[in-house]
Amino acid sequence: MNIKNIIKLSLICLAFGNFSAQNPWSQTTETAKPWTRWWWMGNAVDEKGLDKQLITLHKAGFGGVEIVPIYGAKGFEKQYLTYLSPEWMKMLQFTTNKAKSLNMGVDMSVGTGWPIGGPQVDEQDAATKMIVQTYEIQPNEKFSEKIVLKDEKQKNLKSITLNIVTAYNDKNEAIVLTDKINADGTLDWKPSSGKWTLYAVFVGKTLQKVKRAAPGGEGYTLDHFSPDATKDYLKTFDKAFGNSNYGIRSFFNDSYEVYNADWTPDFKEEFQKRRGYDLSPYIKYLVGNEDNEIATRIKSDYRETLSDLILNRFTKDFTNWAHSKSSKNTNQAHGSPGNLLDLYAAVDIPESETFGSTQFYILGLKRDSADIQKSDVPDINMLKFSSSAANVMGKKLISNETFTWLTEHFKTSWSQVKPEVEQVFLSGINHVFYHGTTYTPADVKFPGWLFYASVNFVPENSLWPHLKGLNSYIERTQSVLQSGKSDNEILMYWPVYDQWASPKGKDVAFKIHNIEKWLQPTEFYKNLNKLGKSGYSLDMVSDKMISEAKLDNQNIQVSKEGGFYKVLIIPQLNYLPESTLKNILNLAQNGASIIFQNEPKNIPGYFEADKRKAELQTLWKSIPFQQNGNVKSATFGKGKIVLSLDVSKGLENLKIEREKLTDTGLKFVRRKFDGGKYYYLVNHTSKEINQNIPLNFVGKQIALMNPENGDYGIADTQSNSVKIQLKSGESLIIKASETADNSVAKWKYVEKTETPIILNQTWNLVFKEGGPELPKARVLKKLEPWTNFSDDVSTQSFSGTGVYSTTLNLKNKKADDYLLKFDKLYESAKVIINGQDAGIIWSLPFEINVGKYLKKGKNTIQIEVSNLMANRIRYMDQNKLQWRNYHEINFVNIDYKPFDASNWKVQPSGLDGEIQLIPIHYSK
């Protein structure tokens, strides 16, 4: 091994703590580290600024960036670069070259702002909607009105066409009159009797423009249902990129936020081809809100067709295009009217999104109701749509846009971030992108350029010195979650046809912002929650996936690279395609275990509905159910089918074991690797868990791994359980291996603690860095926040780092270790003992082991505390110092109102309460 490799290995070991030569953490790459969305405001970037910020991001522990150009700062228009221009491409090439030299990766969005669109989207390729006009024709009346589009905004568009004209009488009898309309809009038809209502459907345009577009990215949003639109759009990138991908790892498409797009020029023809009948005679049922069987079936077919089109005409084409550039693609499917599972499955890196703040019950975790989104709460089951698709199809990476509007600007601490990202991990996601980081030129003063909907992961953030603590934690965790394969045992069918059968509206968009309407009220969701809390691990599955599934040793597998599943659950539903039931029974015939929560009694769609419904019933009757205790069950071929309203009883009947560790309140996600399994455990309860917990798999040796500090050791086990000690807010990784490694030391369990030493002596406080000015140094008789000193005005406005220091005379050092425990910390701290860096305290509980840095006798202790940006921003707004001056939306608060911090309360900053030094003795 050469000297460079020795140094590199040494650095890796330092990063992950002290272990034996058998390093337990997977070999980390840039993918294991967190990445960040990198907004290029106005594309006003230059090589000097790019170089500086990439180096800064690298040093802070980032593995890559995702370039998203957006609107610019006022006064810098001369520095703006046009998107995809030769000058812009030169900056992109510089970025990827520099990133490569730092072992970082670069992704970029296929467009500026969101949703996808831009100047290359002409009127023909723009997002399309149906415009419906109705006319009344009275008995014996000559209809003289011209059937022409009345919408003034649409009149001058050349692409507007009349698509369908259908008349209905009082008996709901329909006559399609599309070919009876002359070029000038006159109707060449007269009813023989009765009153008629005529429905005219025009192909119109939404006229929606790209939101938050950057220079050169302005224009219409794309028609996702048109293959020509997608191909035309990507030609602009072909021209800019040529035969190169410019070092881009993955091309990214943001969430589908295209409003009122519910049609495409050839929709009628595609509908007939895919659904088997002409939509024209039924257009009344589609555009109305009648709650009847015909409307339900027509709307279901319409929505399924939209789903087919966005999958086959946009998502798959986007993937193929990225592959033609020797790159991957990343796609956020949520918000679209498509089957989310199939859309996520059709890309290389499915990406979900967390928006808002979750309520956790971790001791000491702050969550001010005034500083959070009122309407949006991240939901682990929503996140599972992306991870399920990836797990089922065998995709290695599942990404997430993380921390969007987690709290109000400038009020997010890293301790608040940790449980939120842990919930993302628990959903099965393993590749997080922060939302995010804004490029700022080197000469722009505090707070630099900022984006309006983010946690500000920017070097100007006063908490930046301690971000490495969070990033290292994520790196260690993701290095495990990206290894091996997901190890979920249950597949649960998503009854999307129940959603598509809603009589309300036309398209059904599956947004993260309205899950209380389409997801949370369903039995499907209730099962996900109940089974997850009970200790079962689940992935969702679509009709398409079920049709592709095969059996391998009685385990269900959809893709050769995907997971193996012990059982398929069909939750309570109203609609199930007869083709899907047939595929389910074929799986059972070949050895699969199936649970139905109820008998499926109806099929979706209108075409030959009675015939298909009869086929569904015949298939169901072929299952020879017999009463078996609390459930009905049947042997079906080589497999078994259970019918039980209580799914957990069905699982017990099939002897599918749950992980009983969740009875303690712990949450987990499990991965399998060659020779063992990983359990990632999180304690989001308010209690400490100090006990043996059962595991379904223990292997021959169990090791515990602390992703926060890199500690590692062999665990105490008893039968099929392992001893753990997890305080509120802590996490742990369990590695259960089939082979034993005798070179690894034992895990250090705390057996007892001695009386704490209270550090209530005199402290010195000086200020190291920050602004607007450094407060004066102080001698403190007791620990307290620097914001308590209102006699010094600068303490009220200061954001930065204050250093508390003292000396401690340790009479003896007989304990195995010493725990430095903080009562209150605002917000994070670096601890230095006797001149040695003892680590960063950034998450709850606020404590750190420091025994190896202490000595008998006199010890010096320095605690470098960094606070929020909030107080400095408050000062700037009170003094009307301009710092937010952007085009477009400019800068808004969490309620999307103009931002103003001048009336904020001063945020406490520094140390408060007691600091204890607790002698610890480990079990032998």
Image (spheres, helix red, strand yellow):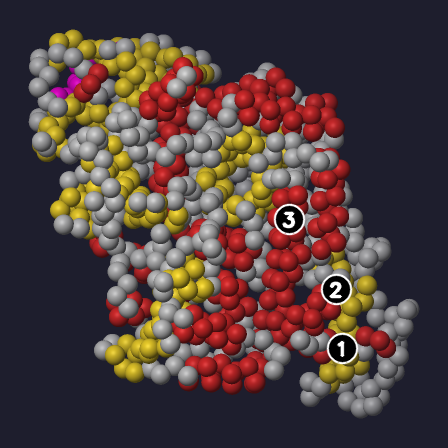
Q: Tell me the SS state at disc 2.
A: loop
Relative depth, front residue between 656 and 787: 656
Label 3 crowd bin: few (<14), some (14–19), many (20+), radius 10 Å: some
Magenta-highlighted residues: 757-764
**Of the two numbered discs 2 and 1 in the rendering, the one whose residue sits closer to the viewer:** 2
Describe residue 302's horizontal placement relative to residue 603 as left or right: right
Query: Which label was assigned to residue 320?
Result: 3
> What residue does disc 1 label?
166
Identified at 21% across, 21% down, the residue is 850
Q: Position of residue 324 (x, y in %)?
A: 66, 43
Residue at mark 3 to residue at mark 2: CA–CA distance: 23 Å
- Of labels 1 and 3, earlier in sequence is 1
Relative depth, front residue between 896 and 96: 96
> What residue does disc 2 label?
266
Identified at 33% across, 82% down, the residue is 625
**Of the two numbered discs 3 and 2 in the rendering, the one whose residue sits closer to the viewer:** 3
- Of labels 2 and 1, earlier in sequence is 1
Q: Marks 3 and 1: in contact by CB < 8 Å? A: no
Residue at mark 2 to residue at mark 1: CA–CA distance: 17 Å
Q: Quadrant of residue 254?
A: top right
Q: On screen, 402 above or below 662? A: above
